[in-house]
Amino acid sequence: MSITCPQCGLTQETPADRICRGCANAISSLVAPARSVLGLGKEAAAKALPAGARVAGVVLLLNAAANALTMVKQGPGSDPLAHHEGRPPLVEEEAVHRAIFLAQQAGVRLQVVHVSSPVSAELVAGAKARAQRVTMEVCSHHLLLDLDDLVRLGPYGRCAPALRDRALVERLWDHVLSGNADCLISDHAPYTREEKEPGWEDIFAAPLGLQNIQETVPAVLSEALHVRGMPLDAFVRFASTNAARIVGLFPRKGTILPGSDADIVLWDLDAEWTVDSASQQFSKNPWSPFDGRTVRGRVVRTLVRGETVYVDGEIRVEPGHGRFLPGAGALVPAAAS
């Protein structure tokens, strides 16, 4: 029996959990299989789950937005703030609340991605306090930009979740400094200027996403270490170690230990520089929402698997040097010792 979703129009086999596969959060496509596996015998369940899941349990990645609550008023001349007004924090918070509940019922691990609301972070903290296997990540732009920047950047500041009010940004930082926010990520989306420019006339004409991967770590390190006093070892966990644990790559990645991959970044932590994407980025399409920002802390040299890949402002390896590594047995981040 098939059913058509009234929200997004997707026709699908009637889901056992009555959650649309197309629009009711990314969790929807995984909750039903997880529940089905829980109803199988042990041997059948082992065969039904992928190899990584057999080791660590299914891991759900949730980009939290309750589509039924999204209040988008599209029309000619919509200004940048219309994007934020159509995706208020409530849209994210409700989805995180529901996802945590469903993940607990299904008995699976949950990684909440792109958290922009401190209320969402508080919900994750509460789940952790109940020993539920929930982790979260935060984007650089949700820590460094706010609604004033959305107005200034226009289409180049349109992302999902939307940029937030400064008061919410400050409260989100509390979760970073306390260690509740597990990971720093970029959510890099390298749209061209040609794709973004129509958003000046109508913000909804611009695609969602920011190009920021090159500046994410140095810009957030500058703010965290030099402005907010975050200990360097805590920042390393936030920017590297915890992510490696969550996706099951620790200790091969995320640490410097015998047998690890020798992925090392050497920094001059006091060097100041100004973001100028046109002259600095290695992207084929250079632009950055952080253009003009003064950053304290510069990468001097980068090694991957013990080999220098970047030094003196130049990339020293050919395309294809990287390797794909599947996760293998995810771990929940360890508490700071």
Image: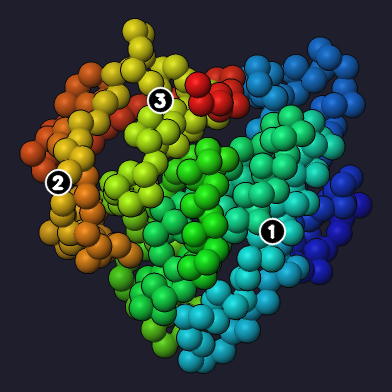
| Label 2 Cα neighbours within 10 Å, binned few <14 / some 14-19 / many ≥20 | few
Q: Secondary structure at mark 1?
A: helix
**Residue at (51% x, 80% y) in the render:** 81
Residue at the top extreme, as displayed: 258
**Residue at (25% x, 62% y) in the render:** 293
Viewer-closest of 269 and 320? 269
Per the rendering, the mark at residue 93 is: 1
Distance, label 3 to label 2, CA atoms, is: 24 Å
In primary-sequence order, the first of circles 3 and 2 is 3
Amino acid type at mark 3: Gly
Per the rendering, the mark at residue 254 is: 3
330 is higher (above) or lower (below) than 92: above
Of badges 3 and 2, nearer the viewer stands 2
**Residue at (79% x, 31% y) in the render:** 107
Direction from residue 59 to residue 47 in the image, left or right: right
Amino acid type at mark 2: Ala
69 is higher (above) or lower (below) than 129: below
Amino acid type at mark 1: Glu
Per the rendering, the mark at residue 271 is: 2
Viewer-closest of 177 and 40? 177
